[in-house]
Image (spheres, rainbow, N blue to C red):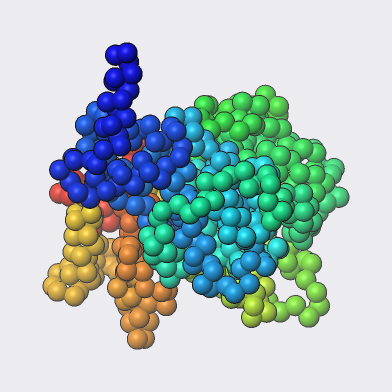
Amino acid sequence: MAENAEGDLNSNLLHAPYHTGDPQLDTAIGQWLRWDKNPKTKEQIENLLRNGMNKELRDRLCCRMTFGTAGLRSAMGAGFCYINDLTVIQSTQGMYKYLERCFSDFKERGFVVGYDTRGQVTSSCSSQRLAKLTAAVLLAKDVPVYLFSRYVPTPFVPYAVQELKAVAGVMITASHNRKEDNGYKVYWETGAQITSPHDKEILKCIEECVEPWNGSWNDNLVDTSPLKRDPLQDICRRYMEDLKKICFHRELNSKTTLKFVHTSFHGVGHDYVQLAFQVFGFKPPIPVPEQKDPDPDFSTVKCPNPEEGESVLELSLRLAERENARVVLATDPDADRLAVAELQENGHWKVFTGNELAALFGWWMFDCWKKNKSRNADVKNVYMLATTVSSKILKAIALEEGFHFEETLPGFKWIGCRIKDLLENGKEVLFAFEESIGFLCGTSVLDKDGVSAAVVVAEMAAYLETMNITLKQQLTKVYEKYGYHISKTSYFLCYDPITIKSIFERLRNFDSPKEYPKFCGTFAILHIRDVTTGYDSSQPNKKSVLPVSKNSQMITFTFQNGCVATLRTSGTEPKIKYYAEMCASPEQSDTALLEEELKKLIEALIENFLEPSKNGLIWRSV
């Protein structure tokens, strides 16, 4: 009897109008409890309400995720600012509304949905479930949906959007983020990630239709609707067929004595990298057994990001030593990025940075183009691209070899969009990259792709092996020919947006109003580019060639000694990042001297421009 009474009391509490003293919060609580049909996330909000946790309720319900780099990314859990069933339904309703406006043939061409292997038991939230709900919203509106029947690498979604001529696609993934996170990554009909103004317009449409429509929760539609198609076999076959375009030494690959270890970091990569190796004629790479199968807890690594280097590659390096394998390939959990390590003669492992791998890829892709080009191919028609905070090594190679090099704003969405333009104008793009181990060989996919990058590295290593050259030795040869490029990237944490803004505003008004610094300590500054304001001192009209990006801070300094350094804020984290690179000419071969000069310049940059102690910045913990 008492139990029932308490049950009734709780039921009344949760269904009465809410009187927290905050009308906005009361409305949000009412909406959540009316709209959410996931018992676990609904219960999270009910428990907070029962326990009077108004601040936490406000944090979860009174703000909404914004569209960041090509979509949404947040922690999984209950609330409008988190990734969960309801917010994914709302986002897809907004997508539907916007796409219906943009494409008269939306219902003929359809929409692609893929997902990785993330999940959270406490909110019964998994990438697969969120993908099914994304599909359900669209199927209920009579849109054909290409829903992959199992997890796929992120690059499969942009690839499928192009191949199937769909209007757009979504990949449910948080890539290499911590295990608590998930995301909703959006691709346009071009196969590139969305850019402005689509992101802002989609957000507006989401806000206009937050109440779930009839049928939006009906995830049975993915089993019953004739409009649901599974593109898995077809896309996998086409993707692997397209891979052959960047395979140049299949016979040599089949004979190599080199062994490779591959770790998929508890994510989606294993099966697809095995298939790619088969396409290239290799024996299968040796998988790391503890990390081969999907595990949303990422139980063997402190963070699922192979970019962190040796500390997270421990299991694969030890396995490689036991198996006598010299090269380790690590794809991140959604297999769009690639880390590479190579065993050196001294018994130590060399974990390559993204910039070092790009030097090798750039050399390799151009060398293969040169050896295989048709008679009438023109080097002036050839392009490589990199984001502006990445190494300038491709620029040096391009200047020497006669092809074009272009920079984009940070983020692969800008690279994807620019490649699309170049291809439409009859240009040939061999390679593109961003320093955070994101690589694209060829142009079958217009996003970074760890699967193709892994097998291209394997072919490069196998080819070099026939000449008794290691990847590290070849990197030195590239630098000796085109000039040493030594770079260092790190960051500071800063949780106060006002401090961040004042650091950058000080640089814009350094010795006097509207005057940028002329020196950084003792280092003379040659040029300054500020893409936040659109200023570039190196251009005759003083206007930046790169598009203005007012929503983030980014200033690049070119020094008289050949160093280029950029300070920028992160789009997704409370960080101020710095990227510094010493770009030497081929005759400057004293690497110790160049490294020392770079070290001093970074110290000056931190001390004079960031002033960490004065601004309360937190150094990156190594």
Position of residue 323 in the picture relative to residue 583 (left or right): right
Position of residue 325 in the picture relative to residue 34 (left or right): right
Identify which residue is drawn at 34% across, 59% down: 568
Image coordinates for residue 157, horizontal then vertical, percent: 62, 55
User: In the displayed structure, would residue 364 be above or below residue 316?
Assistant: below
Kindly indicate the quadrant of the structure image that contains residue 429.
bottom right
Q: Nearer the viewer, residue 532 or 22?
A: 22
Identify which residue is drawn at 19% across, 74% down: 515
Report whether residue 274 is seen.
Answer: yes
Position of residue 29 in the picture relative to residue 476 (left or right): left
Image coordinates for residue 380, horizontal then vertical, percent: 65, 79
* Residue found at the very far bottom of the displayed protein: 541
Q: How many marks?
A: 0
Report whether residue 332 is seen.
Answer: no
Kindly indicate the quadrant of the structure image that contains residue 106.
bottom right
Image coordinates for residue 462, horizontal then vertical, percent: 75, 46
Identify which residue is drawn at 46% across, 68% down: 198
Image coordinates for residue 585, horizontal then vertical, percent: 49, 65
Identify which residue is drawn at 38% across, 31% down: 43
User: In the displayed structure, would residue 569 be above or below residue 454?
Assistant: below
* Residue found at the very far top of the displayed protein: 1
Q: Nearer the viewer, residue 266 or 321?
A: 266
User: In the displayed structure, would residue 393 be above or below residue 593?
Assistant: below
Q: Nearer the viewer, residue 413 or 163?
A: 163
Q: Quadrant of the N terminus?
A: top left
Q: Quadrant of the C terminus?
A: top left
